[in-house]
Amino acid sequence: MTLGPARRRGLGSEVADLVREAIFDGRYPPGSALREVELSEALQVSRGPVRDALRVLEREGLVRAEWHRGTTVAVLSLQDVAELDSLRGALEVLAVERVVATGASLDEISAAAEEMERARTPHEMVRCDIAFHDAVYAAAGHSRLVQAWEAIRSQVHLFLLTRVQLSTDGYLEQIREEHRDLVAALRLGNAEGALKLFAVHRRHAFDVLNSGS
């Protein structure tokens, strides 16, 4: 059997990282057009790496390509929101149960919650929120669970960005308080109580998106 040459991580991956960050920090909100020519000029690369990058982001669910509209930052439908919420909930049940059952260290989870005290904008807080849940999945000690989370992580980030686009009233303090409560519940080692609080935390974002649609 003859194999082709191995490809190292290329320019397309770097462009994908840059465009992803631009989406996450609000420079390209949901619905924004992502034009190959403009991106290649802004990033000073040819259109090939840009095209590769957009395909990566499409696989992540961050962008959508349609023949009559070109490529745009994904706008989540009600079905998208419901599916993400239900899948995220199923994954979190396993993650929280394992964190409690194994007596995992909560140091990184606590540190992620403390970082929220320094967030000054909704976009910073969304990043902190995602980092907190990264820490929960890491503490669960289940590699395939982490992979499942990473498969939807970018879409959940977009989900939360869509939530703050609709309303930021009281958002920063609400998220800080919710995550303080989540850490406290995990420290008590009561899986049932912790799962109820995680479900309430998810429900708040879900309700904002549903009421705003």
Image (spheres, rainbow, N blue to C red):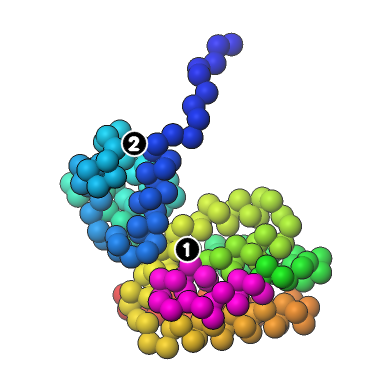
What is the number of the mark on residue 78?
none
Residue 140, image x, y percentages = 72, 62
Residue at mark 1: 156
Mark 2 belongs to which amino acid?
Pro
Q: Residues within 10 Å of mark 2 (few under 14, many from 20)?
A: some
Depth check: 204 or 56 in front?
Answer: 56
Mark 2 lies on a secondary structure that is helix
Query: Tag count in the figure?
Result: 2
The magenta region covers 110-129
Instruction: In the displayed orientation, state which residue is furthest to the left.
Output: 68
Instruction: In the displayed orientation, state which residue is furthest to the top.
Output: 1
Q: Residues within 10 Å of mark 1 (few under 14, many from 20)?
A: many
Depth check: 112 or 212 in front?
Answer: 112
Q: Reply yes or no: does residue 126 show up in magenta.
A: yes
Seen at 64% across and 64% down, the residue is: 135
Mark 1 belongs to which amino acid?
Val
Residue 41, image x, y percentages = 22, 43
Residue at mark 2: 49
Q: Quadrant of the N terminus?
A: top right
Foreground mark, 1 or 2, reads 2
Seen at 69% across and 51% down, the residue is: 143
